[in-house]
Image (spheres, rainbow, N blue to C red):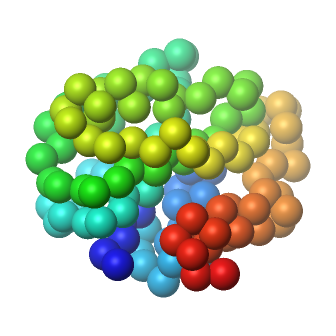
Amino acid sequence: MKIKVVYQSFSGHTKRIARTLASALKVEAQNFKKAPSEDSELLFLGGGLYAGSLDKKFANYLQNLSTKHQKVILFSSSASGQRPSKLIKEILINKGYSVDDQELFVKGRFLFLSITHPNKADLQSVKDFALNYVGQD
């Protein structure tokens, strides 16, 4: 199965989750700015909210996404608990992508909020999610 892991991250938390997903799936995590235009059967796609909105460059990337993916699974991290998945999912569905209702959310940290996250248990849950999703456990 051709699997891709693509992410957008400012603080590094979503990047850490992406790398953990990719490692479990034996693929490379790719920053959206450098991700090659390749089709896949399964795309794990992660990003964050910044002041309640998607990063403008990431939103533009999503709007212009032209590769074919049979299924998209969203993942994110946030200290506040706000999830970007609704905004990302809306863009992708309007473009005709099949976005799974199941998503991966990991508590993140910001300044002094949730300072211990993501921790080892969080990252193990990321690995478990990936392997269970693709049926490789």
Residue at 43% in and 67% down: 29
55 sits to left or right of 20: left
Left or right for 40, reference 82 = left
Q: Nearer the viewer, residue 77 or 99?
A: 99
Q: Position of residue 40 (x, y in %)?
A: 26, 66
Quadrant hosting residue 34: bottom left
**x and y percentages locating residue 118 in the rendered image:** 76, 53
Q: Percent from the top left, x then y, of residue 38?
A: 17, 66
Q: Is residue 104 visible?
A: yes
Q: Quadrant of the C terminus?
A: bottom right
Residue at (28%, 57%) from the top-left corner?
A: 70
Name the one closer to the observer, 13 or 122: 122
Q: Looking at the figure, which quarter contains the N terminus?
A: bottom left
What residue is rendered at 52% in x and 71% in y?
A: 134
Horizontal side of residue 54 vs 33, given as left or right: right
Residue ranking furthest to the top: 52
Residue at image coords 29%, 34%? 92
Please name whichever residue, 31 or 65, is drawn nearer the observer in this view of the structure: 65
Looking at the picture, does residue 21 appear above or below residue 84? Answer: below
Vertical order, 43 against 108 (above or below) = below
